[in-house]
Each structure stands twice: as C-alpha cells, then as structure tokens.
Amino acid sequence: MDRLSAVGDPRLRSALEFVRSQERCVTADELAAEDRVHRNVARSRLERLAAAGLLETGTSREGVGRPAKTYRAAPELEAIEFPAHHTAELVGLLAEGRGDLRDVGAAFGRRLATAAGLHTARTLDDVCAGLRRLGFQASRDGDSIVTPTCPLRPLVAAEPRLAAIDEGMWSGLVGTRARCGISGCLDPSSPCRITIDKER
C-alpha cells in the first residue's frame, strides 16, 4: 500500500491522526481502546500504515512479559497529495533568487513538461495529454486550454499576486515564448481558461 492509498482510507487516516496526536509511541491496545475495535483490527491498521511508510515501529518493555510493539509517526519529507503539484520544485526555484516571477513559472513549467514526458515540439493537445498523465484534467478548446484542476490554481487563489508564476508556467509547458491570457482562475464555479498566443 502506498502513502496516498493509506490516507485515502478513513479508518487508516483516523489511526494515523491518533498516532500523530500523541506525545509518545502508541501500541495497538491504545488504538483499540481509542477506536473501540479489537486489538487485532487496530494492529492491522497500524501495520498497514507502517508498510506504507507513514509509521515507524519499535518495542517498549514496561513491566514483565513480552515487549509491546510500538508505533510512531515516521519523519515526513514530502507532502502527500494527489495529484502531485510539485510545490517543492517551485519553492526551490523561488529560493534560487530569480527576480522575475514569470521566469520562475516558465522554469517550473519546463520541469512539469519533463515530468509529463512532453517532447520539445508540442501542440496544445500534447500539453493537455501531458497534464492528464500528471493527474490534472485538461482539454483543448481552439487556441485555449481549459482546466478545472490547474496545477497552480490553489496557489493563485490563495495569493493572486502570484499569477505571473502561473502565466510563466503555461509558457514553459507550451515550450515556446507565449502570451498566456488566463481567465476564470479565481472563480470557484468555472475552470481556468488559458489562451495561448505563441510569440513569433
């Protein structure tokens, strides 16, 4: 089981939340008491989370008898998200100190294009297919790309001043200098529409 599948299961997510809410390692007995389930059910949930890399296991000897198996949150170096928004790469580009946000976006778009397996010469249909491979719904409508799941839409919705990064990203995805007119990005009831005008 992978990390995303594990947090997608409400019972496993609840078990993970319980472990993360504790100051110290927990046992299957403690989760069983919390969730009011049999200890074997609790142990199974904890083991599945450990197999997914979300928990680490250990042992604790308190009193006499066999040591108890314990579980604690595993160190987390990347966010669990679907689809992957590649936010860490974007932050890395910003940390390089590039001054022009559109240039940052273009570099990010080129990285997304590589992740999507797009070749140097690409059409809007190619870009849409590449975005779909990354988990973002996108379709071509004439000289526009329409997407309700734009990779940077959550970022731009939270901070509209970063729209230049989004515009640059589309230029990088298209693979050539382009003017990208973006509309609908801040409207929660409509998809983003990116009109591409390739510069000659």
Image: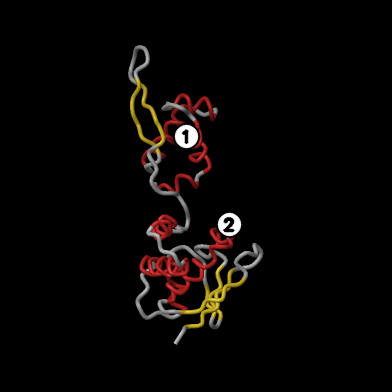
Mark 1: secondary structure: helix
Residue 96 position by quadrant: bottom left
> Which marked residue is nearer to the observer: mark 2 or mark 1?
2
SS assignment at label 2: helix
Label 2 vs label 1: CA separation?
27 Å
The image's colour scheme reads secondary structure
Compared with residue 44, is residue 181 higher up or lower down, i.e. above or below? Answer: below
Residue beneath the point at 55% across and 83% down = 142
| Callout 2 crowding tier (Cα within 10 Å): few <14, some 14–19, many ≥20 | few
x and y, in percent, of residue 99 in the image? 44, 64
Q: Which residue is mark 1?
A: 20
Identify the residue at horizontal 53%, vertical 65% (top origin).
150
The mark found on residue 168 in the picture is: none
- Looking at the rendered structure, the kind of residue marked 1 is Arg
Give the x, y percent position of residue 143: 53, 82
CB atoms of marks 2 and 1 within 8 Å: no
Instruction: Give amino acid for label 2.
Output: Ala
Q: Residue at x 57, y 66 (%)?
A: 148
Give x and y (percent) for residue 119.
35, 76
Q: Position of residue 191 (x, y in %)?
A: 60, 68
Q: Is residue 190 left or right of residue 61?
A: right
First in sequence, mark 2 or 1: give its number. 1
18 vs 69, nearest the viewer: 18
Which quarter of the figure is the C terminus placed in?
bottom left
Which residue is labeled 2 in the image? 158
Outermost residue, bottom side: 200
Q: Give the residue at x 39% y 43%.
A: 76
**Vertical arrangement, residue 105 with respect to residue 76, above or below:** below
Residue 67 shown left or right of residue 158 in the figure:
left
Looking at this view, is 108 or 142 the one in front?
A: 108
* Total numbered labels: 2
Q: Is residue 130 above or below residue 90?
A: below
